[in-house]
Amino acid sequence: MINYFELHAQPDAIRAIRSLGLAHLGDAVFELMVRSWLCLQGKATSKGLHRATVRYVAAPAQARAAEVIAPMLTEEEADVFRRGRNTSPHSVPQNASRADYQAATGLEALFGWLWLQGETGRLNQLFERIMEGQACL
């Protein structure tokens, strides 16, 4: 049985996944981390949680998060981020510029890639840096 909370996928299997597939997974990983962080910060009402979550996971916020962690990335991580960022989006949300949306996709691809490798420690390290000094919205 596969433990989907402690994945250690083979490098060949991960390389076979397109950047948008990694971003799809990474979007969920990032959102779960944000939701957990908000709950631990005491955001108790569902309405408040939803609004705050949307603020942190929207493309402009993820683009800023990518800028924050960029200096921390290894060469391999930076390559994964660039591949995700350089993927041509089919559409861009109204509340985001194309550049923000592409940077957000790069961040999501990176988080998906790390998740599939079981690199939860690295995910936590990057996430903590992103949330450092953030006020709970």
Image (cartoon, rainbow, N blue to C red):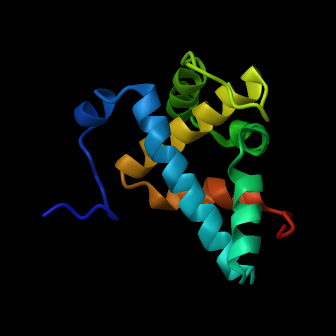
- Residue at coordinates 73% horizontally, 72% vertically from top-left? 47
Q: Nearer the viewer, residue 126 or 2?
A: 2
**Residue 88 in picture, x, y percent from top left:** 56, 15
Tell me if 122 is positioned left or right of 43 in this view: left
Residue 69 position, x and y percent, is 71, 43
Residue 29 percent coordinates (x, y): 50, 54
Left or right of residue 123, residue 44 in this image: right
Outermost residue toward the left in this view = 1
On-image quarter of the N terminus: bottom left
Residue positioned 43% across, 54% down in the render: 119
Q: Nearer the viewer, residue 8 or 112?
A: 112
Residue 124 x/y as whole percent = 58, 61
Using residue 92 as the reference point, say whether residue 132 is left or right of it. Answer: right
Q: Indicate whether 80 appears above or below 124.
A: above
Q: Quadrant of the C terminus?
A: bottom right
Residue 65 vertical position relative to residue 104 in the rendered view, above or below: below
Q: Residue at 71% x, 36% y: name it.
A: 70
Kindly identify the residue that appears in the image at 68 percent across and 42 percent down.
72
Q: Quadrant of residue 104?
A: top right
